[in-house]
Image: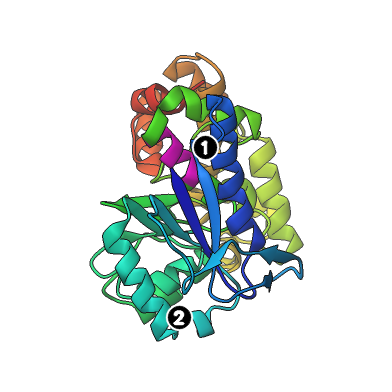
């Protein structure tokens, strides 16, 4: 099965190497070296200099490539202006999209597909820092701002960088089943599987964004003390602010309310516990600070888009 990854000058190297390693590991686990054959197709011949300065050799170019492709992925880059305006590349992508079994993008590679008209009317994902820009530039695409990856028909798109590995793992599961995907994930020390609708903003990642030490200190306290009183009055007191000032500054610094952050932190912890243990819902709720199991179940479904039972059926060890 031939996997083609489109690369170009200033490409994000991990957008290429991450999915390639997932497919290669799947072939190794299957004991069939040719189960997945990854080919790097460049927009020009020779060695491509990636955004990190490391160089990447291409196997073919869009002008010289021959033969069928099963899966085509477009890698991303911090700088895609040239690629998004390349008429020759756009025509090649449109032609390939009609011929391949599935196609898609990693990270900001979505902009290249969008410029080719291949995201029109489609649900798509990209790096969290580029979702607003993608939605504004290509309003006919339905951008899902916090998705790890999205499938819409034969189109697959992923969030930033390492999410391309989640996307490749989902493709492996589609091709060969859950058991192989789990073996690959364990070997590569990945999450066993993150649901496509799960937010790419974990509470721990969100806690790194605030510039105010007082807000970061409150976030760290929340993450370390999920069973404590984490109401706005309690957190405001810890920050040494009035409730109104604290709520305003917290939202300004983090883009979310204190209550939303607390809920996200608790459900993030509950999700991990659900994956790693057989604790019943009531004990899970208690472990992450919910006094009411029904409230916990509602919050879990609201945050992850699936019920606790469904999540465990699909994603637990």
Is residue 68 found inside the magenta-colored segment of the image?
Answer: no
Left or right: 89, with 53 as reference point = left
Residue 306 in the figure: left or right of residue 167: left
Which mark identifies residue 84?
2
Q: Secondary structure at mark 1?
A: loop
Task: Give the magenta part as a residue range.
Answer: 168-174
Q: Report the side of 294 relative to 111 (left or right).
A: left
Query: How many residues crowd around disc 2 within 10 Å: few (fewer than 14), some, or many (20 or more)?
Result: some
- Estimate the spatial distance between the alpha carbons at disc 2 and disc 1, rounded to whole Å: 33 Å
Write down the quadrant of residue 206 in the picture.
Answer: bottom right
Tell us which disc is closer to us: 2 or 1: 1
Q: Is residue 19 visible?
A: yes
Q: Which mark is residue 34?
A: 1
Q: Which mark is residue 80?
A: none
Please give left or right for residue 57 compared with residue 177 in the image: right
Q: Residue drawn at (43%, 62%), measured in percent from left and top?
A: 66
Q: Residue furthest left?
A: 121
Residue 273: give x, y in percent of width and height: 55, 25
Q: Earlier in the sequence, mark 2 or mark 1?
A: 1
Badge 1: residue crowd in 10 Å (few <14, some 14–19, many ≥20): few
> Where is residue 304, by image quadrant?
top left
Q: Give the x, y percent position of residue 120.
A: 26, 70
Instruction: Residue 285: tell me if it is visible.
Output: no
Who's the residue at 52% across and 45% down the image?
37
């Amino acid at each position: 099965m031939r996997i083609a990854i489109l690369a170009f000058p200033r490409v994000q190297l991990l957008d290429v190497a991450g999915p390639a390693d997932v497919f290669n590991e799947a072939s190794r686990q299957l004991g069939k070296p040719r189960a997945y054959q990854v080919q790097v197709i460049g927009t020009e011949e020779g060695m491509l200099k990636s955004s990190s300065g490391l160089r990447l050799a291409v196997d073919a170019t869009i002008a010289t490539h021959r033969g069928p492709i099963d899966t085509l992925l477009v890698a991303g880059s911090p700088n895609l202006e040239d690629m998004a305006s390349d008429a020759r590349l756009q025509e090649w992508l449109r032609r390939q999209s009609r011929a391949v079994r599935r196609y898609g993008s990693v990270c900001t590679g979505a902009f290249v597909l969008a410029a080719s008209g291949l995201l029109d009317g489609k649900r798509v994902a990209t790096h969290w820092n580029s979702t607003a820009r993608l939605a504004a530039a290509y309003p006919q695409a339905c951008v899902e701002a916090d998705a790890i990856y999205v499938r819409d028909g034969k189109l697959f798109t992923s969030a930033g960088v390492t999410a391309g590995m989640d996307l490749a793992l989902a493709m492996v599961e589609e091709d060969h089943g859950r058991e192989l995907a789990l073996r690959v994930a364990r070997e590569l020390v990945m999450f066993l599987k993150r649901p496509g609708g799960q937010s790419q903003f974990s509470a721990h990642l969100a806690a790194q964004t605030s510039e105010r030490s007082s807000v970061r200190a409150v976030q760290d306290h929340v993450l370390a003390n999920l069973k404590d009183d984490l109401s706005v009055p309690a957190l405001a007191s810890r920050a040494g602010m009035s409730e109104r000032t604290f709520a305003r500054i917290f939202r300004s610094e983090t883009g979310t309310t204190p209550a939303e952050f607390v809920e996200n932190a608790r459900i993030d912890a509950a999700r991990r516990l659900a994956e790693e243990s057989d604790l019943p819902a009531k004990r899970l709720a208690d472990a992450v600070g919910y006094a009411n199991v029904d409230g916990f179940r509602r919050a879990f479904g609201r945050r992850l888009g699936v019920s606790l039972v469904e999540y465990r059926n699909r994603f637990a060890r």
